[in-house]
Amino acid sequence: MQQKKRKLGRGVAVVGAGMSDFGMFKDKDSRDLLVEAYNEMVSSVDKGIDPKDIEAVWVGNFSNDFYTHQAHLGPIVADLLGHTPKPVTRTEGACAASTLAFKDACFAIASGFYDVVMACGVEEMSKLSTEEATEGLALALDKPYEGIVGFTFPGVFGALATAYFEKYGATRDDLMNVTIKSHSNAPFNPKAQFKATVRDLMNRRIERAKKKGDPVPAWKDEKEALWDPMFNPPIAWPMHLYDCCPMSDGASAVLLVAEEIARNFTDNPVYVIGMGQGSGRPLHTGASLTSFEANQNGAKEAYEMSGLTPKDIQFAEVHDCFSIAELIHTEDLGFFKPGEAYKAVAEGQTRRDGPMPINTSGGLKCKGHPVGATGLAQMHEIWEQLRGEAGERQIPNKNLRIGATQNLGGTGGTCTFCIFERR
Amino acid sequence: MQQKKRKLGRGVAVVGAGMSDFGMFKDKDSRDLLVEAYNEMVSSVDKGIDPKDIEAVWVGNFSNDFYTHQAHLGPIVADLLGHTPKPVTRTEGACAASTLAFKDACFAIASGFYDVVMACGVEEMSKLSTEEATEGLALALDKPYEGIVGFTFPGVFGALATAYFEKYGATRDDLMNVTIKSHSNAPFNPKAQFKATVRDLMNRRIERAKKKGDPVPAWKDEKEALWDPMFNPPIAWPMHLYDCCPMSDGASAVLLVAEEIARNFTDNPVYVIGMGQGSGRPLHTGASLTSFEANQNGAKEAYEMSGLTPKDIQFAEVHDCFSIAELIHTEDLGFFKPGEAYKAVAEGQTRRDGPMPINTSGGLKCKGHPVGATGLAQMHEIWEQLRGEAGERQIPNKNLRIGATQNLGGTGGTCTFCIFERR
């Protein structure tokens, strides 16, 4: 069968987006966070939305089964939002769960069955210990091949970084550039779990040392601090603490409508012009350690649907669960050539004021990574940037028109790529 | 907004269906079962299918997270079937998980994005003890309202049966009629977990008593045996053992294509003419105990899409996780008036040779209920019946043209209803 150009029979637009604060909350559970995200989404609709007009909902969640002993989130979301008896479907694809909710919601509109639907995502991870939460995340590995031999995610991404270093000559300094860039955006994101630059964090440590009468660190710059294992301890070599995203709780939501009615909701919709997804084999099969095959299929589908090439993408949120992942993704998607991403980061190309801003939200590293909420939280950033509503972290490019999100689950088992346009 | 008639912009047809044996397997896991279902699906395609032409997959699974400590089934399914790097999306809606996979797969075809996709479902439950598996199933309850007060599913359905008895004057004898009818179909389903009639089971018990020299039961008929607590012990009043479906392992799969290319695959496709889904509130909200509001929304959507009324449905597979559920569902879908289903069953209307055959597969009660595989296994029965391939359990009606499946998750939290036509 001849591969055809992917397309939707009916266009889809985002007309609202919301997210909860991301963080570790002792006093909020999944339901509270979903309501926060939903309320913000509803109030973000410029011309208003009667929630009764939402015909169906998709919810992405990785494993509240494990984290809170609650599966079957569909009817709970419905009850919570006053949506019962209308449908709610849960999707799961590890950390890409809510992008799968988004995609299936788009298909449902494009099919003609619904005109107005919501996609949301949620995860509640912080009430478990780090050990338990890590065990939970390991459910996303291929158990008999990866899980059972003791791999956890920091270990997997440590292996990828080692392979990347070996192949392309990058070093830990190059990973640090990713971290420093992400933290440079974080103070301007009011939803972020960590709102500090690396310099802020260094200053806090210095103040604490002074207060306690400990020896005061005399780091000359961020890099020297990040090389100091007392400031940035090793997790799984070469991944150190500041290469790793945190455990988080949070929720996110977008309102999707058929393109032809988008302007009933806002004069400033964001159109879905590309969607793609791929699957990848576990590491024991000899999968590449410096590229995700799932990314390549996701990119192929989304570029085919949009008719665009990587050069057309002006900025993106990519899945930086670990600093190395950001480098690999931006190469897989064609923003940079293989082996060139770390150089581009060093040159400042991915900064907010660079030619290809990446993770202006602060990324998973700083914004936080409640895994089932992440895909749609990335879209929340695209929504705010394309509409010029990102406040102090607004990308200075005045012709911002096309942004993208890339989301990864497992060890590259599921990758998605979505492209959005302001017209 | 005016509710419009639901429709898909592009028709969808089933051109292949397969399922594994259902049962409790010590020597097979989820992967083995998925391959069994997939292989049967591929070989069921009359004019053949090159598996490389399958563009995307949806997989329904309730909680292998809990049962086998393996979430993120998407890439595993892809790897298993040689489908990598193409997309696989997992859906979850408790025991309705694979119908949600089916629906999202249909939306994707109807959207125009894909032409050929697979929907499959799997669950592996039997390697846990009954206590552990029951705890796993309880993840589908609303935890803070239902789970935490000690409800389990037999208890919930016992409460529904009690309410039904009180409202309509039914008794345990009426539930027994459902059980006897389901078991009357079971010997003719080669995939079924239990292939015995109630009479067969009585005879086995009598033989065993004779062999052991125990007092030999002198039941005059099936009902007398089912009233005997030594044969049919209580589980949660009025639910006794033979009112309850078993714990099962199994997998199921269907091949879906765009209507306009269906005849490239078979001269005998089965068309998807109605799809619907609803959500329901947990019991503490005062939800009805004799009807599921989620069913009513599912029925509304599917009847609107098909333009049919309940009278047009000639036979159905409905979600008889407990005998009482079969009665409620057939009323909610309009096959029988409220409070009339138990009388219809007593009159033999739902037998294979009756005017409205229900659960000719043996139902969940006898076929088995690997929860994430059940929705598509119901469709497997519709596929075989509509194509005249159901062997000894073939419905004798020579004009069989329209069949339906109804699937329930949780305490009615998610219900689906799908209508199929042979043209």
Image (cartoon, coloured by chain):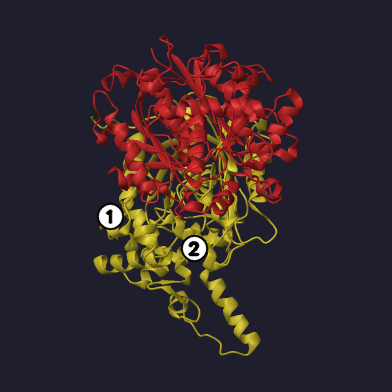
Chain colours: A red, B yellow
Q: Distance between the residues labelled 1 and 2?
A: 35 Å
Q: Can residue B53 be seen in this view?
A: no
Q: Are marks 1 and 2 in contact (CB under 8 Å)?
A: no
The picture places residue A244, in percent across and down from the top left corner, at 57, 38
Residue placed at 56% from the left, 90% from the top?
A: B215
Question: Residue A165 lies in what quarter of the image?
Answer: top right
Q: Mark 2 lies on which chain?
A: B
Above or below for A399 versus A372: above
x and y percentages locating residue B363 in the rendered image: 49, 57
Whole-percent x, y for residue A407 in the image: 53, 31
Q: How crowded is mark 2: few (under 14 residues within 10 Å), some or many (20 or more)?
A: some
Question: Which chain hosts label 1?
Answer: B
> Front-most of B222 and A212?
A212
Instruction: Look at the image and tell me in which quarter the N terminus of chain A lies.
Output: top right
Residue B155 drawn at (x, y percent): 39, 67
User: In the image, are marks 1 and 2 on the same chain?
Assistant: yes
Q: Horizontally, is A412 left or right of A13 in the view?
A: right
Question: In the picture provided, is A179 more to the left or to the right than A248?
Answer: right
Residue B82, compared with residue B284, is above or below; it is above
Q: Nearer the viewer, mark 1 or mark 2?
A: 2
Inspect the image, locate mark 2, and give the three-letter code of the amino acid beneath it.
Answer: Glu
Q: Which residue lies furthest to the front in this view?
A: A213
Look at mark 1 in the image and give the residue it sits on: B337
Q: What element carries label 2?
A: helix
Residue at the outermost top position: A399
- Look at label 1 and name its amino acid: Lys
Q: In this view, does A336 lie above or below B378?
A: above
Residue where numbered disc 2 is placed: B135
Q: In which quarter of the image is the C terminus of chain A?
A: top left
Residue at left offset 57%, top offset 42%: A215
